[in-house]
Amino acid sequence: MADKTQLVIVGAGPGGYAAAFHAADLGLDVALVDPEANPGGVCLYRGCIPSKALLHAASVIHDARAAAELGLHFGDPAIDIGKLRAWKNGVVAKLTGGLGQLTRQRKVRYVQGRARLLDASTLEIEGAPDGTRRLAFGHAILATGSRPFELAGFPRSPRVLDSTSALDLGDVSGRMLVVGGGYIGLELGSVYAALGCRVTVVEMLPGLLPGVDRDLVRPLAKRLEVDLECVRLETRVAEVEERGAGLSVRFDGQAEAETFDRVLVAVGRGPNSERLGLEATRVRVDERGFVLVDAQLRTEEPTISAIGDLVGQPMLAHKASHEGRTAVEAIAGHKVAFEPAAIPAVVFTDPEIAWCGWTEDEAKARGRAVEVARFPWAASGRALTLGRDDGLTKLVLEPGTGRVLGVGIVGPGAGELIAEGVLAVEMGATARDLALTIHPHPTLSETVMEAAEVFFGQSTHVFRPKRR
Ligand code: NAD
């Protein structure tokens, strides 16, 4: 390896590797540094991909159970946890191996190790297979991601899990407490519940998934009442102690402790901005440690950009990848800015919840007048054939023009359906555009079209005339 590169990218998650590949495609000389043997980052090794593999297994179990209603009886599943774990690990290995190959095909120089800035044009890379080395760069993009928050007062014990160790599926029997009713708590809590664990979720706020419209959360909350042992809202953990064969947990305002076999802590994530050597540069961070960047993802240090979880919410892989490509184009001298009208978010529970653009609650909180058109899936033929009439599709629209400002969907496949909503918001589409676009029948995608028809009081399958 030469000791100088035009562009170095620190961190090979979906932000970092997308940036590296795009830079190589644009003809730049690129190095990509990461402690893992192949690119992938948290998303592929310890996040999105392994959790979605396990959620798929959970949905197979659910569907088999639900099939009893159609007269199809499968009986209880015999779960080979070792094989499930191996299958999930195989998915991860295939994807990360594929990324390694794409890295080589593009002639991106991959350096395994942990990088630290020595100044605004030099990195020191530790832990590389051939020893600590230095790399001089013209530009750097920092893409080191985030890590789970820990909670003070929780014992250091193999029974206390974070999202990473929970994905290892050590033991799925007995009782599990999930602290935090957000994305990770509900996704991984659902996996453990489907595999036979009795799961309690404790959330400090009055509702699950804070920030998501309540009408979208309701169908999920209802289902969780059945699938989980208990959901405790407006509750915090006061004390956790390891005692013999379990963890003794006392909740705020409760005298008696309860015993759990394990506790999963999923109370949010914070940026990996420490130990990066930022103090040796002019890069600035905010009070929570997020690196401050402009619309071109440039920091205060002209040679250094930053992307992804490291620069703030939403901490989502697809946001990081797009930021990565924008950062590279800005470095290459293109006139670009990261200014999306909508970034989709998906919670991969059953039902899934997906939304983009303005939510109804956000519009209310920020005093923006909106009209909301809802299409309940009980009126969708396709939803009924799937035995799932609990879904909802809603449009958040600009009064008068009917411009689509936001879309929210709850129901199976919501994560796939939301892409149409994102396109509508990005293209400045109106409810009329959605209503006039012929959607295939019978599909769940029709619910987007019919929600737009509801706005005009003219939905074929919902009788809700508008007052003239
Ligand atoms: P989150 O912010 O989604 O949820 C954390 C929850 O914990 C919140 O509801 C919060 O009110 C609650 N909480 C905080 N402190 C608590 C306490 N002491 N006791 C009880 N509850 C407490 O965070 P997460 O679930 O850890 O996920 C982290 C991030 O990872 C997410 O913000 C998201 O960006 C990303 N993520 C995305 C996906 C996805 O896209 N499907 C999946 C997993 C994670």
Image (cartoon, helix red, strand yellow):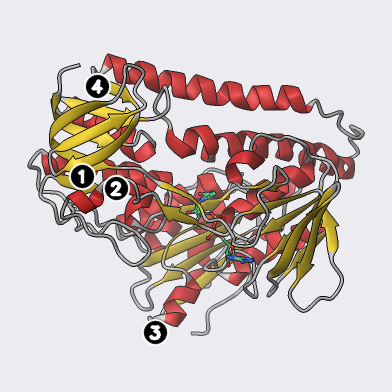
Q: Earlier in the sequence, mark 1 or mark 4?
A: 4
The answer to which image quadrant residue 24 occupies is top left
Residue bearing the label numbered 3: 367
Vertical comparison of 358 with 262: above or below: below
Q: Earlier in the sequence, mark 4 or mark 2?
A: 4
Look at label 2 and name its amino acid: Ile
Badge 2: residue crowd in 10 Å (few <14, some 14–19, many ≥20): many
Residue bearing the label numbered 4: 108
**SS for dot 2:** loop
Observer-nearest of 223 and 42: 42
Q: Earlier in the sequence, mark 4 or mark 3?
A: 4
Tags 2 and 3 touching, CB below 8 Å:
no
The answer to which image quadrant residue 247 occupies is bottom right
Name the side, left or right, on which 233 lies relative to 392: right
Mark identifier at residue 307: 2
Q: How many marks?
A: 4
User: Residue at (48%, 24%) from the top-left corner?
Assistant: 95
Observer-nearest of 355 and 280: 280
Q: What's the distance in space between the residues labelled 1 and 4, CA to CA?
A: 17 Å
Tags 4 and 2 touching, CB below 8 Å:
no
Look at label 3 and name its amino acid: Gly
Name the side, left or right, on which 51 lies relative to 62: left
Badge 4: residue crowd in 10 Å (few <14, some 14–19, many ≥20): many
Mark identifier at residue 327: 1
